[in-house]
Each structure stands twice: as structure tokens, then as C-alpha cells.
């Protein structure tokens, strides 16, 4: 062994006091735990990604009207990377996990234990939610000048209604009653009209929940509790809808 090989001298130490920069999570500053790697090539703990990656509301995509709300895995989520804010998804990295497990077995086991204990008692949990926003439309009659009257229904559907407090729907101000608050599903309203316009909907969560999105708005009592969404009515082909995949945080203490 070369006399200059100083790193070799401390390798036998039971306590790892120096962790390689690449093996540290840039968010929690601990040894990576269940590491995930993003498309922008950032490596971080799975739980750090789940908690800190923000979902952009503008990442919604138009999909067929007959798709129903369903849950999905947090890892398939398109979200803003907490490090560089690029819209990305993440995948588990077995190479990184093997490397840190091998290099820092004690640290890693400690993190595993903390993780499991945390799962049982933690008071913050992150949940994913699929939200559909859209409208159906049925032609009812011709009203002349090439215009047609439509019977349309605007809706917001969510994969878990138990977290929703209310959905506020705001129509064009020329409507008689432009504001409607729906306290239970279906969160939809039906009207007749010939012109399309942009409907606004504020999806408000129950107490203890908040949206993990910088698009969310605070109320007097809670932070990031209301998520403003917009939808431009579409009368062609019977209507259309878009899907957004979002994340919420629950800060209520779980029962042990
Ligand atoms: Zn971390
Ligand atoms: Zn990144």
C-alpha cells in the first residue's frame, strides 16, 4: 500500500464520517435511501422525491371521455425535479442502492430502520390523486346563423373523493348564476348554451390536506388548500376531458 493512500487508512473505521458526495441525497443530506434517478439525472431518496417534487397543473393531457379516475404510482408521475425544476419522472436505481448499501452498511441499515418506524407513525403522508376535468356536450337545436344550441355538462372527477371539501365552479359572468359550490360528488354542472368559454374550478381539500403544487392557493386558515383549474369548453365530438396527476400532503397525525 502506498504511503499516500490516506483514504485506505480510515476505511476500517466503524463509523463512517465521510460520505462520498455522490452517495448523499441533495435534499436530506443523508446517505441515499431507496435511491431514484430522474430523467434530468439527479439522484435522491424515493421519499424525498415523493415529498418535494412538485406537480405542474399545466402538465394535463387530453384523453378519451370514457376513461375513469384511477390511482397510479408516484414514480410514474411527471413532476418538477426538486433540484433543477425540470419536468421529469423518476425510476428506482438498483445500482445506486447496491453501491450505498455496500459502502455504508451501518448508515443504510439505520436509514432503513428509521424509514420503517416512520411509515408506522409518521404524521405527514403524501398521496397521489388523479383529477379529470372536462365536459360532455349534446347538440339540441339549430338557432340560426349557423349556430347550434348545446346541452353541456362541465365536470371535475377525482380518484379519491374523501379528501375533497368542495369544488367551486365559476362560469362566464353572463350566466345568471355564475358561481356554484359543490360539496359532494358529482362535481358537475349542466347548462344550455351556444358559445364556448373557459370555466374555472377551485378544488378545495379537507382540513389537514394541502396540494403539493406552487399553483395552489392559501385560504385564511390553511396553506395551499385550493387548486385553481381551468377548462375551455369543447362542443365537438360530444365533449372532451383532460387528466392531471397531482399530489397532496396529509398532515394529520395517524392513529397508532
Ligand atoms: Zn433524501
Ligand atoms: Zn433535476
Image (tube, grey):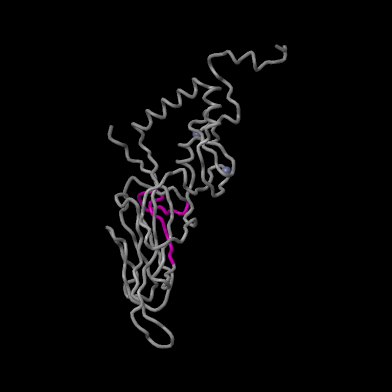
Judged left or right of residue 62, residue 8 is right
Q: Please, which residue is most extreme toward the bottom here?
A: 144
Could you tell me which residue is drawn at 49 percent across and 24 percent down? 108
Q: Start and end of the magenta stretch?
A: 214-231
Q: Splitting the image into 4 quarters, where does residue 68 fall?
A: bottom left
Judged left or right of residue 2, residue 11 is left
Instruction: Report if residue 253 lies within the magenta region.
Output: no
In the rendered image, residue 54, in percent from the top left (x then y), is placed at 48, 47
In the rendered image, residue 25, in percent from the top left (x then y), is placed at 54, 33
Q: Is residue 105 above or below residue 130?
A: above
Q: Is residue 143 above or below residue 82?
A: below
Judged left or right of residue 186, residue 194 is right
Q: Nearer the viewer, residue 129 or 28?
A: 129
Could you tell me which residue is drawn at 28 percent across and 58 percent down? 185
- Say which quadrant the N terminus sits in: top right
Q: Nearer the viewer, residue 105 or 165?
A: 105
Q: How many marks?
A: 0
Which secondary structure is most common in the magenta stretch? Answer: loop
Q: Nearer the viewer, residue 208 or 58?
A: 58
In the rendered image, residue 237, in percent from the top left (x then y), is placed at 41, 71
Could you tell me which residue is drawn at 47 percent across and 46 percent down? 76
Instruction: Report if residue 221 lies within the magenta region.
Output: yes
Could you tell me which residue is drawn at 42 percent across and 50 percent down? 246
In the rendered image, residue 256, in percent from the top left (x then y), is placed at 28, 32
Q: Is residue 248 above or below residue 24?
A: below
Amino acid at each position: 500500500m502506498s504511503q499516500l493512500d490516506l483514504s485506505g487508512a480510515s476505511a476500517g473505521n466503524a463509523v463512517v464520517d465521510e460520505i462520498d458526495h455522490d452517495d448523499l441525497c441533495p435534499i436530506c443530506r443523508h446517505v441515499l435511501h431507496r435511491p431514484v434517478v430522474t430523467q434530468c439525472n439527479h439522484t435522491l431518496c424515493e421519499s424525498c422525491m415523493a415529498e418535494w417534487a412538485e406537480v405542474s397543473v399545466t402538465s394535463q393531457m387530453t384523453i378519451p371521455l370514457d376513461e375513469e379516475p384511477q390511482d397510479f404510482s408516484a414514480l410514474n408521475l411527471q413532476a418538477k425535479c426538486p433540484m433543477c425544476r425540470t419536468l421529469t419522472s423518476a425510476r428506482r436505481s438498483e445500482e445506486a442502492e447496491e453501491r450505498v448499501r455496500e459502502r455504508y452498511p451501518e448508515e443504510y441499515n439505520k436509514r432503513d430502520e428509521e424509514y420503517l418506524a416512520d411509515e408506522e407513525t409518521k404524521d405527514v403522508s403524501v398521496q397521489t390523486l388523479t383529477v379529470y376535468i372536462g365536459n360532455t356536450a349534446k347538440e339540441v337545436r339549430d338557432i340560426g346563423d349557423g349556430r347550434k344550441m348545446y346541452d353541456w355538462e362541465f365536470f371535475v372527477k377525482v380518484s379519491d373523493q374523501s379528501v375533497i371539501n368542495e369544488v367551486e365552479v365559476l362560469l362566464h359572468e353572463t350566466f345568471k348564476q355564475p358561481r356554484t359550490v359543490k360539496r359532494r360528488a358529482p362535481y358537475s354542472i349542466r347548462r344550455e348554451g351556444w358559445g364556448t368559454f373557459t370555466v374555472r374550478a377551485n378544488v378545495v381539500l379537507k382540513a389537514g390536506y394541502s396540494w403539493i403544487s406552487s399553483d395552489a392557493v392559501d385560504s385564511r386558515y390553511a396553506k395551499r388548500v385550493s387548486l385553481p383549474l381551468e377548462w375551455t369548453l369543447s362542443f365537438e365530438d360530444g365533449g372532451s376531458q383532460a387528466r392531471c396527476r397531482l399530489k397532496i400532503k396529509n398532515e394529520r397525525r395517524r392513529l397508532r
